[in-house]
Amino acid sequence: MLKLFNKAKNSYLCNTSYPLDKSNFIKYKTDKELEFNEDKLCLYIHIPFCTRLCSFCEYIKYKKDNKYEEKYLEILEKDINSFISKHKFTLYGFDIGGGTPTCLELSTFKKLMSIAKKINKLNTVDDYEPSIEATFSTLSYDKLKLIVDAGFKRISLGIQTTNTKILDSQNRNIVSISDMKKVFDIIREVGIKKINVDFMYGIKNQTVEDIYNSLECIKILNPDQVTLYEMRYNMVNQKASISKELLFNQYSIIYEELIKLGYKGRFSQNTFSKYNDFGLSSYLRYRMIDNISYKGFGISAQSKTSQGISYNIGKSHESFDECIKQNSFIEKDTYLLPKEELVAKYIMISLYYGMFSLKIVSSILEKDARKYYKRELDFLISNKYIYIEDDKCYLTKDGFKYYGAVGSLFYSKNVKDWFMGV
Ligand SMILES: C[S@@+](CC[C@H](N)C(=O)[O-])C[C@H]1O[C@@H](n2cnc3c(N)ncnc32)[C@H](O)[C@@H]1O
Ligand code: SF4
């Protein structure tokens, strides 16, 4: 166990990603489709277009080309209608992400919002909070009015860093803080309840000074929520030797500043909020914290049930034409997973939130998690990497520094063997 922990401690592979490599799940691959018999569900739509492609970005996206958009929406709508007509469920959350959903042409964006409006009218829980991702330069008053009319309560905008040199070197669009402020004013004017901004740390060449400078814009914009993303290098074609200590220092600085600015959040959490909420859309909250099943629509989107996981076409970097030819984006790669893989997947995603629930682990395993993972939990508690309160395991400060290693103890034997061999 110690050997695994020490190897994972400094490995760039160990973060919230799971599995660590596509080959890890090959033996669970099936021709069957995932069955969605659950009565609780979250939905996600992936819009894979962007006006520019940032080099740090780990998501499946294609350079925006107007002639593809309508066809994409047509297939998407067909897939969604077919799923909704066959399944009965209570909707816990719904996110539209990407890519950049708001980069669609206004007419296509209208179509997307009409699909979303239908989803938002399904049977939902009381704290249902649908959310949409956007970038500053792709928003307009007309699009924002459509977003409100479709029923969205939250909008999430990426800032990442305000350092123009870094943004430029990563091929990302540069937006001035005064232009960001103008967009914020329109969002407030049209009546969207919550604005979240995404920040990144650990980007190549990002320094502590850049981080302090970037945080200045939070003072000016005053978003309701802030989400911090540690740069993950395992999914992109970029090499940088960023130590866990450097990542920890950068996170700690941002944490201190956010708390000073009145944001709430536990150390180790990646979401912060001005309110007593989770700092997350209900889609992410129920997916990450409560392990609710989710269904993804669109190229490369992921779905998960209590039986397994599946990825829509595009996840293996198929060309856009290849995806369109299928005339449906639904589940291309499906994996029926044993319980210990489902546990590992749940724990890795919960670590974004700096915790995981033993009650949920026990319910996945159908066994007492405290007994099943006794050695692992004892090791983590005695070394002060986690502490347990009620049924929840929380990362300590040291545990957060090496959260990837904490998570690695819960990898399946299959994935542990693969990792120790690389
Ligand atoms: C779907 S993406 C982007 C949404 C929107 N297009 C934008 O650029 O703001 C959501 C967030 O993921 C984060 N992200 C992208 N690539 C990442 C990576 N390689 N590692 C960690 N976070 C990443 C960024 O903070 C980004 O805002
Ligand atoms: S970060 Fe956003 S804008 Fe940049 S490539 Fe990724 S999805 Fe597109």
Image: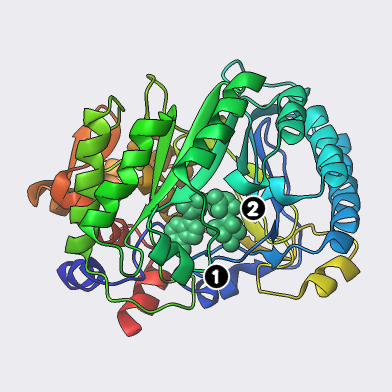
Instruction: Indicate yes or no: mark 2 CB to ligand 2 under 8 Å.
Output: yes
Q: Which mark is residue 414?
A: none
Counting other residues with Cα less than 10 Å from the Cα at mark 2, is it few (<14), some (14-19), or many (20 or more)?
A: many
Q: Residue 188: in sight, yes or no?
A: yes
Q: Position of residue 11 (x, y in %)?
A: 28, 72
Please give the residue where the numbered disc 2 appears in the rendered image: 98
- Please state which of residues 417 and 400 is positioned toward the viewer in this rendering: 400
Q: Position of residue 160 (x, y in %)?
A: 43, 52
Rendered-image quadrant of the N terminus:
bottom left
In the rendered structure, the answer to whether residue 410 lies left or right of residue 397 reads right
Q: Is residue 245 above or below residue 265?
A: below
Q: Nearer the viewer, mark 1 or mark 2?
A: 2
Counting other residues with Cα less than 10 Å from the Cα at mark 1, is it few (<14), some (14-19), or many (20 or more)?
A: some
Residue at image location 76% in from the left, 61% down from the top? 32
Please give the residue where the numbered disc 1 appears in the rendered image: 25
Residue at image location 66% in from the left, 21% down from the top? 190
Amino acid carrying mark 2 in the image: Gly
Q: Is residue 379 above or below residue 21?
A: above
Quadrant location of residue 20? bottom left
Residue at image location 33% in from the left, 76% down from the top? 240
In the rendered structure, the answer to whether residue 393 lies left or right of residue 71 reads left
Residue at image location 77% in from the left, 30% down from the top? 146
- Please state which of residues 56 and 321 is positioned toward the viewer in this rendering: 56
In the rendered structure, the answer to whether residue 313 lies left or right of residue 118 reads left
Q: Residue 355: in sight, yes or no?
A: no
